[in-house]
Amino acid sequence: MIYPPPIINEIVHGLHLANIARYLSLGGLVALLYDHVLTLDQEIRLIWKAPNTFVKWMFLVTRYLSEGCLLALANEMSGFSQPYDDIV
């Protein structure tokens, strides 16, 4: 019986771990978006209508920037995004 070289097993194991990371990242993104939907009415009532302060803007920046970054990361990790160099 011919066994694959050890490097092949390491590559397969690495790809398996990368796939697990993709699913865990997706689960975290879904939980974050679900939390955002559940608390959006409170955010509108308490944050958006509050006077402009540094704390208010830092809250909004961190809330929406983190979601944007996670969405971009999920898009990149999904395998559906194409490199910009290949766009004609």
Image (tube, grey):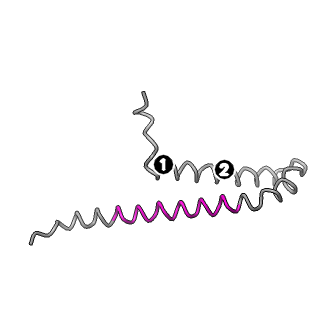
Q: Secondary structure at mark 2?
A: helix
When asked about the image quadrant of residue 82, the answer is top left
Q: Which residues are magenta?
A: 14-35
Q: How many marks?
A: 2
Majority SS type along the magenta span: helix
Q: Position of residue 57 (x, y in %)?
A: 79, 49
The amino acid marked with disc number 2 is: Leu
Q: Nearer the viewer, residue 34 or 72?
A: 34
Horizontal relation, residue 49 to residue 6: left or right: right
> Which residue sits at x=65%, y=61%?
32
- Gap in Å between the C-alphas at discs 2 and 1? 16 Å
Q: Residue furthest left?
A: 1
Q: Is residue 21 magenta?
A: yes
When asked about the image quadrant of residue 9, the answer is bottom left
Horizontal relation, residue 27 to residue 12: left or right: right
Q: Is residue 49 above or below residue 34?
A: above
Q: Position of residue 72 (x, y in %)?
A: 55, 48
Q: Secondary structure at mark 1?
A: helix
The residue at which mark 2 appears reads as: 65
Q: Residue furthest top?
A: 88
Q: Nearer the viewer, residue 30 or 62?
A: 30
> Which residue sits at x=47%, y=60%?
22
Q: Is residue 22 magenta?
A: yes
How crowded pointer 2 is (Cα within 10 Å; few <14, some 14-19, many 20+) is rated as few
The amino acid marked with disc number 1 is: Glu
> Which residue sits at x=56%, y=64%?
27
The residue at which mark 1 appears reads as: 76
Mark 2 or mark 1, whichever is nearer to me: 1
Q: Quadrant of the C terminus?
A: top left
Q: Which mark is residue 18?
A: none
